[in-house]
Image: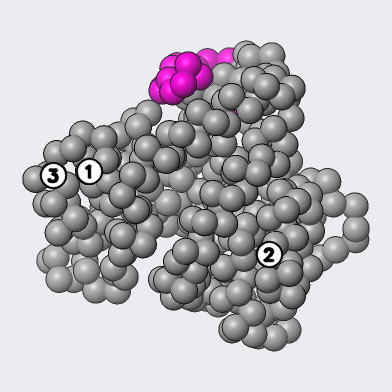
Amino acid sequence: MLSEILKGFIPIDANKLRFPGFVKKNRQQIQTGVENVKKGKGWQDPNKECPVCNCKERSILFCRFDINYFQCGGCGCAYVEKFPVDTSDIYSDEGYEEIAKNAYLGNVDYRKQRFGLERLELIGRYLEKSPACSSMLDVGCGTGWFLETAIENGYNVTGMEYGKDLASFTANRLGIRVLVDSLQNIKEDLRFDIITMFDVIEHVVNPKELIKSMYHFLNPGGIGVIFTPNLDSFAIQHLKENSSAVIPVHHPFLFHEPSLRKIVEDEGFEVVYCSTKGTDILDVYVHYRDILDQQQVADFLRENCDALQAMVDTAGCGNHMRFVVRKE
């Protein structure tokens, strides 16, 4: 049975994705984000209802850095009790952009081979044109390692990045156009065959508007690809507020499959693919390694990481939710 589950599972290199001290760095980044908001324009008034479905029923799910996550009693998504007045207090910070560069450029070849090609294979299943005849927009492109993979495989690409310096860095590195803004603010009459949002929707304070904009900028028959942390994942259920996905300043929302499905279908999309695959066992291993210093448990998880993750993915509890949606 296990051999069948492992068929097609692509191993993950723990050292490439979670360097020693990763968890502590992650916590420092959250703390810096909270401090930057306090020093900047501060917080909006606390949310009294779910920003997605307006339901007032809720329960406290997590609390991290004195910021509560509520789980909506209606749609089921999780949302923070308050949003920053200006997200540029977070994403225009030089330290944040430097972390992004160092985190991705240090292992760009590995990310392209392990994750970039996998993403293109998924897109190729639903693409109605050849890559050479397809236009792609990658929202939140960061350092552009995925776009670089797409270029190498014949796609016509455009990037989008909120951080001005990071956008300029990526545009110059790849020789492509990178739009400096959020998708909702674009005024140009642009259309694309593919719009990708890898780990983006959890960062925005208006996810419904983001999905509405995705629909607007897609050509008829075009596909949208959305990857985001899975609220129902093994990692989040086990680690709770210590999960690397529970980042109240950077991730004001966390979705499970029903809540994300409702958003995209309400905006007119057809969901053609949904799965959950992730790095749950890796994240639990790193927590035991960096925080609890329980090396024996950490060693067991590291040695059995791929087999355990394959089983978690098969059970539909992976911490990375993957949607492909189509515009009619």
Label of residue 295 in the image: 3
Front residue of this view, candidates 93 and 234: 93
Q: Residues within 10 Å of mark 2 (few under 14, many from 20)?
A: many
Residue at 70% from the left image edge and 62% from the top image edge: 169
Q: Gap between marks 2 and 1, in whole Å?
A: 33 Å
Residue at 65% from the left image edge and 44% from the top image edge: 94
Q: Position of residue 124 (x, y in %)?
A: 55, 77
Is residue 107 placed above or below 253 in the rendered structure?
A: below
Q: Position of residue 301 (x, y in %)?
A: 17, 51
- Sequence-first disc among 3 and 2: 2
Front residue of this view, candidates 101 and 114: 101
Residue at 50% from the left image edge and 28% from the top image edge: 31
Q: Which residue was labeled with disc 2?
A: 170
Contact between marks 1 and 3 (CB within 8 A): the answer is yes
The part of the chain drawn in magenta is: 53-68
Is residue 273 placed above or below 320 in the rendered structure?
A: below
